[in-house]
Image (tube, coloured by chain):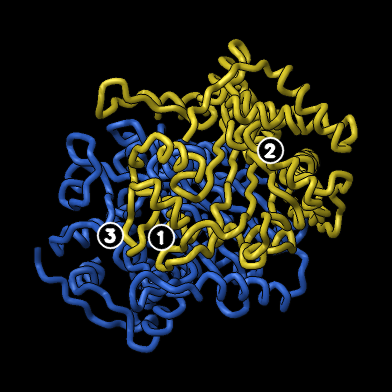
Chain colours: A blue, B yellow
Amino acid sequence: MMPDNKILISFERLKSQLNSILIEYGFTRQKADLLSGIFAGSSLDGVYSHGVNRFARFIQTVKMGIVQIDEEPELLNSSGSVEQWNGNGGPGILNALRMMERAVEIAGESGIGCVGLNNTNHWMRGGTYGWLAAEKGKIGICFTNTKPNMVPWGGAEKRIGNNPLVIAIPREKGHIVLDMAMSQYSFGKIQEYAMRHQELPFPGGFDDLGNLTHDPEIILKNEKTIPIGFWKGSALSFVLDILATLVSGGDSASRIEGREEEYGLSQVFIAIQPGFLPENEKDRLIGEIISFTKNVPGFREGDKIYYPGEKTLFIRELNRKEGIPVSEKVWTEILNL
Amino acid sequence: MMPDNKILISFERLKSQLNSILIEYGFTRQKADLLSGIFAGSSLDGVYSHGVNRFARFIQTVKMGIVQIDEEPELLNSSGSVEQWNGNGGPGILNALRMMERAVEIAGESGIGCVGLNNTNHWMRGGTYGWLAAEKGKIGICFTNTKPNMVPWGGAEKRIGNNPLVIAIPREKGHIVLDMAMSQYSFGKIQEYAMRHQELPFPGGFDDLGNLTHDPEIILKNEKTIPIGFWKGSALSFVLDILATLVSGGDSASRIEGREEEYGLSQVFIAIQPGFLPENEKDRLIGEIISFTKNVPGFREGDKIYYPGEKTLFIRELNRKEGIPVSEKVWTEILNL
């Protein structure tokens, strides 16, 4: 493969470039501003795979008419603190932002809000909506289904999605944001190992005979990645798909299967007021858990534990100071959009 | 180790035996009836480790004054559809039943209910509360923290709990109930392998040097079990502890650590109305997901996939017909209580 040189670009430069492209493709100023901020922000936070690296493909889905730039989510049903919305095939990021905001709004009124969203598009980086809830002082829980891209435990073909799950907890000194897919490794991560001709440190998928393998090339060829915890992640992924489908009244992985692009997804957004303790007591409690967990001897010199979201803050700071590393290839592709 | 012969006992016989013991130990008729039903019911469903096998130890905690038989949960705070309760050190099963019922009640009024419970005792089989919600036609989500019994990823000592997570979905043809701890294997399962002098099929913990091992003896000796998906389950467990602690205003694993018995736990119970589709449409949707996932070719002849809860129904039927297998040792112990 070609060497992939990185150039450093400031957040502002990146956002403004994406912004003008979005406007060129017909997005309103307001939507272009939101979207470019999220794409550039994901790269700022170090989630390059679902930030700038994914932008050209997003524009592709706009051109194909899969992402309908003027559509907005629409309330279909509501009962108390639970609502069901139709994403109308609009931009996945905008739909998801709106739905988490709505869940936060409901939680502001009644302590907890739950919003199901059907007929939406890829939300890119799931963590975005967790950070949003936490910024607004709420616990945020959200998950999405995906096309079947994992082998269920006991099977030999893809039947379950990697269904990312996000859990965010607000905290003065830095929110805690877990953003995890149900697959042991993302395809992006497996590709990185393949490019470096390195084995995965832990099994990441199946070989042709159904044995677990560390070989990234074989996993990419077979497209048979494994769920976290083998049978456990398989079951959790299955259950998340049912939850997303039921609460949103939308399509499950079984219906998304067979579409050339991944559209018509189902998602759930839950916001919860973070308990009844006074703010400073909450922060003390969480600080206690963080210290207890992090102050642990490691097996090896230098072993260290990070809480979910901790590295994000570090990378955000670094990238803001030094610029966001963007692959030259990706940047050229974007400049040519 | 001694051979562990099993005898077959009917659900009714088992329940009635446990019932009289509970009454002897001072439980009211109503509470004894509920508790004996749950203990015997867990064994009926094949969850022996948290059914009859755990009964003598439960009585032990009653004798020690850890479980306070007359205490009941008490509402501390409420705001809309979120409530915070104090378990008052009462029996964990009764507290948890009451809290999931309360969450279901709130969900009946406003679509979703969320209850945090602090200062409670071990809830035994988490699935119990998932089945309860599903029986009442609601999605049930609950989780508990535990004492630190797992090594966080990157550390060499126990700092996180295995924090069981339950997700239940009601369905006419059989509820879907996921009941999973964050550890790859339960201690009970590792003990079974040790007793049979067999290796675990997948790594279950660390050896003295911090390498992953399949050896059940070493894992039991070191008490260093691993989370599902390595770093991912470690992060999920960490986040569940924070959620339980915040929402209940209770103790985290860091405070439960150091107690000789596992008491003063924090739990969360969420019930959600399962969307807005008509009943038959819901069942059709779930059926579709089940068929799609189950009708998958396996790598090996006879490979088969079960949805979470499917085997439970099968074992429940079998044990009801043929009797519940109870270890002779356990039964003798119970008769001597």
If the image is split into quadrants, where does the C terminus of chain B sit? top right
Which marked residue is nearer to the observer: mark 3 or mark 2? 2
Q: Residue at x 62, y 43 (%)?
A: A84
On the question of residue B137 being in view, the answer is no
Residue A189's label in the rendered image is 3
Residue B231's label in the rendered image is 1
Relative vertical location of residue A300 with respect to residue B220 in this rendering, above or below: below
Q: Amino acid at mark 2?
A: Tyr
Q: Amino acid at mark 3?
A: Lys
* Residue under label 2: B129
Residue A58 locus on image (x, y percent): 34, 58
Relative vertical location of residue B122 with respect to residue A8 in this rendering, above or below: above
Sequence-wise first label, 1 or 2: 2
Q: Chain of mark 3?
A: A
Residue B105's label in the rendered image is none
Q: Chain of mark 2?
A: B
